[in-house]
Structure formats: structure tokens, C-alpha cells
Image (spheres, rainbow, N blue to C red):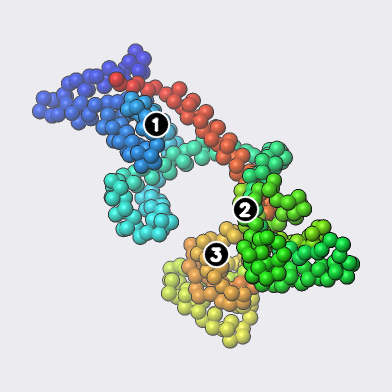
Amino acid sequence: MTKRALTTSLLFLFCSYGVINSYPTYAEVLGKIAAVVEDDVILEQELEKEVSVIAQRIQASNSPMPPESVLRKQVLEKLIIDKLQRQMAEKAGISVTEDMLNSSAADIAQRNNMSLEKFRDELQKQGLSYKQFLDNMRNEIIINQLRGREIGARIKVTDREVDHFLETQENIGTESKQYHLGHILIAVKEGASSSEIQKAEHKADTLVSNLRAGQDFAQVAMSESEDGNALKGGDLGWRTANDIPTLFTDKVNKMYKGEIADPIRSPSGFHIIKMLDLKGGFDDHTITKTKVRHILIKTNELVDDNEAQKRLLEIKERVLHGEDFASLARSHSDDKGSAIKGGSLDWVNPGDLVRPFEDAMEKLSINHLSEPVQSQFGWHLIQVLERQSKDNSSEHKRNQVKETIRKRKIEEETELWMRKLRDEAYVDIFP
């Protein structure tokens, strides 16, 4: 007998007869079955509940509602795929702890600027219990971990693919990019003498220097510009590359937000342009590197949290009274790797360090000392020595492209993987 026939026969047997007359039948306990998925089932009540939830979402989005039969079929397929993925995850030993769930829920509440209690109330108002929310989130996390293992790990993006994307998509990105420009014109009349041209050029250079030093662009435009947009503060509005005067194009394509270009000469005079904003295409990207050092006190059976903080506060006082931070780090820090370098972690990029350390570091002024900061490694006394901002646009752009290609590949692979999973599984849908 085939697996399909055996499973269907057993279900029929259990659903038709009670084991002992004094107990409710299996059918009464189980409820009506919508589908058999491998060795598990989807109940009719599960299906109806999910159909109701998804119908509410469709209505809330003001999208046209599909016929009930179509909606039911699509939802059932979704439940089947979810069930198959959960079964595979269980066999692979993938699970989510209660601590992980609660931590994720707290993060979601925080991102929505709510306390966990308020977030629970909001879920209740939307007709979703906190338990349902956690169950849904558990399911999503497990499936994401499974897909990451089955699909994500084997997705590779080569430098050649990134180069090819940039070569073929550059023009598309440029066309979709929009620029918000400010403009000041220092006019030169037709037939002006060389001294008049020189005077206008000097004025334009002076204005650029003043603007770069912080003078308000709109005010300068209103008082000094000699074109039709002067009373608008020189605002040319949002324009695509095709709408920008050819004279400005080469400059604009290389400008970052807030930049003021050197004066541009034309028959009508000298033009000063400022990149007020831009959107579309690939944004410029600047990262701030930090040169930082620290002293770490680890906790153990002899040193508790209070003792660790007390020691660091004493060290802080010694530094404030003139003792050398590096010497104290070498003699007191439990981070032996940095202690031999006077506590130096050298230059770090955003995301290199654990979050509590980085949050405290970002708030510190140069050469200032932090209060004791706790991380998973122990307690830290932190000092920032230098900061440097670096234009990371080229690398950031390549990373964006790489992530775009990776996401595209994952979507394609996921679709194929789920189709194969569904096709190879035993599924029996009940009418």
C-alpha cells in the first residue's frame, strides 16, 4: 500500500470510529481536516482562521478582494508550504528559545516607540493576541533560519557580476536620479572689459568662500544673484539630469549633498551652484572612523558588577588627576590583547564593536572619559582619541549593488526551492 493510501486510510479509520465508546471520537477532538501534509495535517479551522486574517489585510489595503474560492486555495497553499518548511526545520534541529522571542518582541516594540505593554495592547486592538503574535514570529524566525541555511549559504556574488551590473545599469541609475539645486548668477554683460570680468570672477570666488564658511545660501541668492530665481533663494527645484543645463551637468554628477561647486563661467556670467539634496540612484556615503582605547574589568566569582565599576571609577579619577591612561591600561585591563598597546583598539569602523560599547563611544567628545560601561565582556572605561570622516561612496555603492544582486538571487532560488519542496512532498487536499 502506498504512503498516500495508508495515511488516508488511517485518517478515515480514526475519524470514523472512537477507540472506546466512553471517549470522544478522534474526529471530534481533531476537527475536520483540510489537507494532509506528509505526517501532519492542516485543520479546516486553521484554514478558516488564516483566510479571515488575510481577507482583513486585503480590505485594509483597499485592494480588490479575490473570489472566495481563489483566496481559500492560495491560503491553503501558503499553509502547506509553511508546514513543509517547519517539518524540515524540526528535522534539522532549528528552534527558537523563549528568550530569543521575547527579545525580538521587545525590539519590535522599541522600533515602534512603544513599551512592551503598550505594544501588547495595540495588538489586542487589532484583534491579535500576544501569544498569536509570538507564534507567528517564531514561525517566521524558524523559516528564515531554514532558508538561510538551505539557500543563503550557497548564494555567491562575484566582483565580475558587480562590475557588469554597474556597467549595464549605470545609465538607468543616472536617469532615475534627481537633483535639488540652488543657483546664484553673478552676471557679466555682453562685451564686458577684462577688468569687469575679473571683478565679477573675484566676487563669485568671494561668495563661494563665504558660503562654504557657513553663510546662508538662500539669503546670499536673494541679495546677490542676478537671475529669475533670486527671490526664491536661488532654488531651481528638483530636476533630472536631462533637465539640468548642460553647463552644469559634469559638475552636478560628481557633487555630494551640501557641496558648493567652484564658479562656472558662461557667456552670461559666473554661476554658483549648491547641491541642496539628491535622491534616486546611489547616495553618497560617509563613514566616521574612531580611534579609541579602553580598560576592561571582567567579572568573576571574586569581582562582581559593583566591584568592577568601583575599580574603573578609581582608575578614572587617577587619569583625571594626571596619570597616564596607557600605563594604567597595561597594568589593570583584563583585555590582554589591547592592554599591551595601552588599551588601544586603534581605528574602528561603525559596527566593529559590541552595541553597548559603541553607543557609549559615539556620545563621547575627544579625550573625554566615559562612565563604566557594561557589555557581555565585562565593564569598560572608554576614551576616544580621534575621529575621521571618510567618503566611502564607491565602496558603499558596490556593497549596495552586491546586496541587490544577492537579494535577487535569493528570491529566484527560494522560489525554485519551495516549488521543489512542494512537488516532492506527499500532500492530500480534502474537498
Distance in Å between CA atoms under marks 1 and 2: 43 Å
| Residue with the mark numbered 1 | 78
CA separation in Å, label 1 and label 3:
41 Å
* Number of marks: 3
Q: Tag 2: residue type?
A: Trp
Left or right, 342 with reference to 116: right
Mark 2 Cα within 10 Å, few/some/many (few <14, many 20+)? some
Looking at numbered disc 1 in the image, what kind of residue is underneath it? Lys
**Tag 1 secondary structure:** helix
Question: Where is 107 relative to 297, above or below?
Answer: above
How many residues crowd around disc 3 within 10 Å: few (fewer than 14), some, or many (20 or more)? some
Is label 3 in a helix, a strand or a loop? helix
Q: Nearer the viewer, mark 1 or mark 3?
A: 1
> Which residue in the structure is indicated by mark 3?
358
**Disc sitting over residue 238 in the figure:** 2
Quarter of the picture holding the C terminus: top left
Q: Residue at x 13, y 25 (%)?
A: 20
Residue in the image at 89% along x and 67% along y? 194
